[in-house]
Amino acid sequence: MLEKVKGACLRTGAFFLDSWIVTGFAGFGEVAKTFGDFENNLLRAAGISARFMLSRKHRVGLTADIDVGNNGTEFYFRVGEAF
């Protein structure tokens, strides 16, 4: 069965020093089996991300994120491109 999702996200970013990108983000959402099951138990999150572009041509970067949400703080590290 597919679950229903409601929510929103705001993301903003800036390039600097030619190879670095810094992004801030905030959002909220909820997941339920049906639209009638939504109870405004929103999950909230916000954080900051820093990305170093290894290759613009091949869209490869190193990314580090720090996220704060309802259940604590998380740290993520990636190599590659999300999109």
Image (spheres, helix red, strand yellow):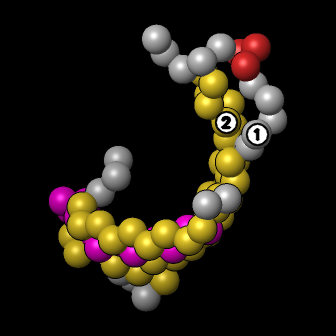
Main SS of the magenta part reads strand
Label 2 vs 1, first from the N-terminus: 2
Q: Do we see residue 24 in this rendering?
A: yes
Classify residue 54 as left or right of residue 51. Answer: left
Whether the magenta-drawn stretch holds residue 1 is answered as no
Which region shows up in magenta?
56-68
- Image: 31 above or below 49: above
Q: Which amino acid type corresponds to the residue marked 1 in the rendered image?
A: Asn
Q: Position of residue 59 (x, y in %)?
A: 25, 60
Looking at the picture, tell me which residue is in the foreground, 53 or 48. 48
Residue at 67% of width from left, 41% of height from top? 29
Q: Which mark is residue 6?
A: none
Classify residue 31 as left or right of residue 59. Answer: right
Q: Which mark is residue 41?
A: 1
Residue at 33% of width from left, 71% of height from top? 77
Looking at the picture, tell me which residue is in the foreground, 48 or 33. 33
Q: Position of residue 76 (x, y in %)?
A: 39, 69
Crowd band around label 1 with a 10 angstrom C-alpha radius: few (<14), some (14–19), many (20+): few
Residue marked by disc 2: 30
